[in-house]
Image: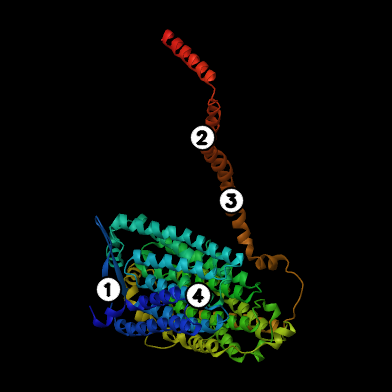
Amino acid sequence: MSNTLQIVWLIPFLPLIGFLINGLGRKQLSKSLTGIIGSGVILASFLISVFVFFQVKNGNTHVAHYFDFINTGSLKVGFDFQIDQLSSLFLLIITGVGFLIHVYSTSYMHEEESKDFAKYFAYLNLFVFSMLLLVMGGNYIIMFIGWEGVGLCSYLLIGFWFKDNSNNDAAKKAFIMNRIGDFGFLLAVFWLIAKLGTADYHDVFSNVSKLSLFDITGITLLLFVGATGKSAQIPLYTWLPDAMAGPTPVSALIHAATMVTAGIYMIARSNILFTMAPVTQSVIAVIGLATAVVAATIALKQNDIKKVLAYSTVSQLGYMFLGLGVGAYTGAVFHVMTHAFFKALLFLGAGSVIHAMGGEQDMRNMGGLKKYMSITHITFLMGCLAIAGIPFFSGFFSKDEILAAAFEKNPVYWGVGVLTAFMTAFYMFRLYGMTFLGKFRGTHDQEHHLHESPSAITIPLIILAILAVVGGWIGIPEVFMHGGHRLGIFLEPIFAESNTLVASLNEKHELSHTTEYALMGVSVVGALIALLYAWNKFSKYEKTTVEETGIGRILANKWYVDEIYDAVIVKPIQSVATFFNNILEKKGIDGFVNGIGKAVNYGSRQIRLLQTGQVSTYMMLMVVAVLILFIIQLFL
């Protein structure tokens, strides 16, 4: 074992220590010390992750075995960490962006009481620990432990302000919908163990030929069910917009660096299984594309600044699944990385705006913030340009790589994907125009208190803005820079077997440079038109009381999906639960059990009346008893 890789266990261990210190000492620690501990452990993990990244950059991979987690019969599951190109990239994203969010939180959450402030940082540290465990695990069991950990932490952080029941409802919604997906994940793991006797990545992938097509398809579909829950795809996506109930830095952590990327990581890690399941890949591509379109249409008519970004996240995740479904694993992972930069920037920028506006989140009550918040404004603009796919910002390279792969697979996929890109540019610059341009539409008191956020907030924004601009340059395609896609070269060992399999089936045909330029041109021109139209329409936005009608009303109400779920699933289940509770349990089971008790109680009260204390009564009873015994004996 490489000496340099013996320290990889410190990467998740340090956030766990931060969780324990801040959690157990929440009543004793000062806010400044809490922030130093909470942020410091993530920074230390990031520095170690950078060190590890350079160890695997040259193609080295390593599986560190610490102890037997399960050892019973023929099943042996080790507590193992696998460090390779894929996990090291995710480590940098999780700890790097996570550290900036922790620093941001030291200012954003400063108004909380000391014990709540410490509890918040304890939860954040636990969240990062769980996500690190998920990506570092050397088998599906360790991945699942981290998988469940981020689900728990999302519940704790979304419902952090638990005195408001709407926050509690959002937290429960996220927790329950994720459990639905997690059940599919667990069934897939059981299926793998039943067929191969192992859950280790190396053993599973090297013995995949022993699985039938039915097995592979079933396993991958179940794994995808898990991914739809964690990464918010149709039909399990409605929890993610409601996750806005938590503090804004939590939204950035969930939407950018941790939880929602888990499904993409799991499929990318299992790429050979999915490559051998063409039916599953088609399902993933269609579901991902449908999610991208539906979420983008909803974002067009949202007025809550965080809700627009939330549906944007769902839509961008749909792009990533489209990439996975068409076999563009590198493109999907690339978009995970660039999305982490610009979406964390956008959420933290929105938090800076909300902080300045005294908690206001409705964009109709904003406007003109450009002259009050110059740093927030320019960094937010960088994020908008990146997510809109404007050359040469980070989102341009990763999004177009997915769209090019989609065109190779099916031009219809590309067409729908480009339409979604147009909508993305429109709703993001609608958000930008309503928030930063035009006249201020808030109250006089709000305007009086408008100011730029403290440096603990603006410095992370500046760093993320730089990454949102240059982060995509590591994935510049061959058509622009001869010498190859550097991220693709880096990740090539992870996806080599899948690429070889696709090549052997003659399923992949390289696009000509002319075609690539044409596809990029259409995408860019469309995005620019949508951008300019939104800028022109909303740069002088005036607040109106006119309600949405027609399709606008439907989109504003999110296609009524929550209402449909409520009518079709929630209310029938509640009715059945009420029946079982009132009829079967209370009147049936409880009635029977309580009836026995009441019968014994009533009988004892009646028998007690025989105890009169009169000798004559006892003598009469003795005579009656003797007569009864005599009659019984006579007839027997």
Crowding around mark 4 (Cα neighbors within 10 Å: few <14, some 14 to 19, many 20+) is many
Quadrant in the picture for the C terminus: top left
Applied colour scheme:
rainbow
The N terminus - image quarter = bottom left
Identify the mark at residue 120; answer none if there is no mark: 4
Q: From the image, state whether disc 2 or disc 1 is nearer to you.
A: 2
Q: Secondary structure at mark 2?
A: helix
- Of residue 616 and residue 275, the one placed in the foreground of this image is 616
- Per the image, the residue denoted by label 3 is 574
- Residue 509, visible in the rendered structure: no
Q: CA distance from mark 2 to mark 1?
A: 61 Å
Instruction: Tell me the element at label 4.
Output: helix
Mark 3 surroundings: few (<14), some (14-19) or many (≥20) residues within 10 A: few
Q: Eyeballing the image, is 566 above or below 355? A: above
In terms of secondary structure, where does tag 1 sit?
strand
Does residue 567 show up?
yes
Query: Reading the chain from its start, which is encountered first: label 2 or label 1?
Result: 1
Nearer to us: label 4 or label 1: 4
First reached walking from the N terminus: tag 3 or tag 1: 1
| Whole-percent x, y for residue 173 in the image | 55, 62
Say which residue label 2 marks. 596
Give, as a three-letter code, the residue at label 3: Gln
Q: Is residue 579 left or right of residue 325?
A: right
How far apart, in angstroms, are the residues tagged by discs 3 and 4?
Answer: 33 Å
Amino acid of disc 4: Tyr
Identify whether 385 is placed above or below 333.
below
What residue does disc 1 label? 64
Disc 2 residue type? Ile
Q: CA distance from mark 2 to mark 4?
A: 51 Å
The one of 19 and 580 positioned closer to us in this rendering: 19
Position of residue 214 measured from the top left corner of the image (x, y, whole percent): 36, 55
Q: CA distance from mark 4 to mark 1?
A: 32 Å
